[in-house]
Image (cartoon, coloured by chain):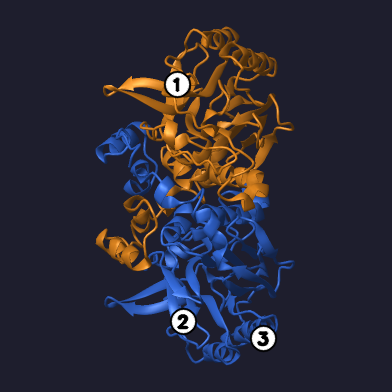
Chain colours: A blue, B orange
Amino acid sequence: MARCLTIGAAQLGPIARDESRPQVVERLIALLHQAKAQGCELVVFPELALTTFFPRWYVEDQGDVDAWFEREMPGPQTRRLFDTAAKLGLGFSIGYAELVEEKGRTRRFNTAILVDPQGNIVGKYRKIHLPGHDQHEPWRQFQHLEKRYLETGNLGFRTFDVFGGRLGMCICNDRRWPETYRVMGLQGVEMVLLGYNTPVHNPPAPEHDALGLHHNRLVMQAGAYQNATWVVGVAKCGNEEGVPMIAGTQIIAPSGETLAQAATEGDELITYRCDLDLGRSYRSSVFDFARHREPQHYSLITATKGPIEPEEAQRLDERLGSGLTPSGGA
Amino acid sequence: MARCLTIGAAQLGPIARDESRPQVVERLIALLHQAKAQGCELVVFPELALTTFFPRWYVEDQGDVDAWFEREMPGPQTRRLFDTAAKLGLGFSIGYAELVEEKGRTRRFNTAILVDPQGNIVGKYRKIHLPGHDQHEPWRQFQHLEKRYLETGNLGFRTFDVFGGRLGMCICNDRRWPETYRVMGLQGVEMVLLGYNTPVHNPPAPEHDALGLHHNRLVMQAGAYQNATWVVGVAKCGNEEGVPMIAGTQIIAPSGETLAQAATEGDELITYRCDLDLGRSYRSSVFDFARHREPQHYSLITATKGPIEPEEAQRLDERLGSGLTPSGGA
């Protein structure tokens, strides 16, 4: 018997710098109504879905930066989103910039939350792979200052048993790293929700600009297949404040096939009725981790952050008891 | 200045059970001559390129099984391959079943070697991710008894500084596991050579049979892109002893783009002049591991072989000092 969850992937077009939270929330609510009409149970909004993608600007005044952050969720300007979703009986996930007092200091994260159909926050994720740089680089046409304005997430890659399945979240650049999906895959994740803001143009490597949509699809499909999970990737896209961003919103099955995808670069909902059991046949055959993984040979993945020389790798491997240990019967 | 290595990916059609080693070696030599004529420097042959894919049969007599193994390399029947390659000034890699006395006992591996243009073996890899099963399963149309006839490789995922670059190897099912490429990527690998024998039909999950070529391409492209490395994937394919196997031999750039691919399911050489520096722009930007990886959040990857429950995952994560450790400045 199929265990289905009908998903709405709610792509957003650009959000202007001077667009207010209430204005954006109205756009989100329009998509919620459409999702309800199309039978959705869970709506996925993109990363930083309440504001423009502000890391593109170097801003000296921290107060000005903090204006893009949420101090509570829901807050006075976002409560209407929660109330409407609850009234419609819809769950949703949404990304936003989070400002929080934690461990005696002010901390800022690139966050996504998962909200159940009653309006309760049932899952939270803080972005771990922050791309970009932390110093102003005036030579760039636009900045990518996530490493300046935000801290590395401190909640790990958790999964949440909600909506009748096991769900996980990650954000934007996280999707390019196979470790992201694997840590959730090792917890039996069945669906990964992720939003992104990805400029077409990457100033340090403009020679890759034509490949943005190819890479976007490649990493999400591979993450889905290699972990036998659905992946719902949702863009904020189009030309935002003069910076074109890729679209490519799509819903990917555990087979690694894209089964639905957006047609535009604007506000657009795509839906799919996802059978959460579809990953089972992979998990019990080619990707039966307990039978087929060989972690004694993976030690470098956690033992080093950056690349190391092969000689050092081999020493490390031997010291950690992996490389030369017979493991045929392990 | 480009740092180019011209590769020949030498796909093989089926090898019959009664085909002798000298007969197969003649086919390999024909491909070597063609490679020489097309300006190749290094020719990549597939997995188990000297025999039929014997794990498809359940054979009780170990002596009969061992007839498919090589006791020395080169041996009397394979020396001609080495001599011809050296005469042509060609390097090559090739997969074969290796029988070796090691640690006081007979051991059997699914092995690939890398041979320099002078005929010296300069690299060896023993397959780590053995697929299939270890007991006879008569309900299958054909067996996949790699876990019965072979031991898990004990040499790790090494890299080798040869042919003017840093090369690595893996074999067949290894390519489906992102850990394979990552362990080599963390050593700065620039090109991964891999051969495979992949049946179209997977008896435990026949519903995936139509996706063999999609998965083949997906995992190799993702491994290439996510580690900024060339990947050369070479099939033994076609209908071998009644079992159809996928082709899909291809040469993939660090961009994750397939730049050359085979057209047939038989013996066929495809070539590409690969600039080993093409990965640099990825390694210095989006995949600058030292700046962007967050291994404190990857601990599950090496801490567990099979999947674990989220609660256990979180305890493990906290015990290993990852999940809740601020790492913004790490």
Residue at 58%, 8% (x, y): give it.
B84
Amino acid marked by disc 3: His
- Mark identifier at residue B66: 1
Residue B290 appears in the rendering: no
Q: Which chain hosts label 2?
A: A
> Which marked residue is nearer to the observer: mark 2 or mark 1?
1
Give the CA distance from mark 1 to mark 3: 66 Å
Tag 2 secondary structure: loop
Q: Are circles 3 and 2 on residues that touch, CB within 8 Å?
A: no
Residue B96 appears in the rendering: yes
- Label count reads 3
Q: Residues within 10 Å of mark 2 (few under 14, many from 20)?
A: some
- Mark identifier at residue A70: 2
Q: Is residue A36 left or right of residue A132?
A: right
Quarter of the C terminus of chain A within the rendering: top left
Q: On screen, A130 above or below A16? A: above
- The part of the image, by quadrant, that contains residue A325 is top left
Q: Are circles 1 and 3 on residues that touch, CB within 8 Å?
A: no
Dot 3 or dot 2: first in sequence order is 3
- The part of the image, by quadrant, that contains residue A185 is bottom left
- Mark identifier at residue A33: 3
Q: Which chain hosts label 3?
A: A
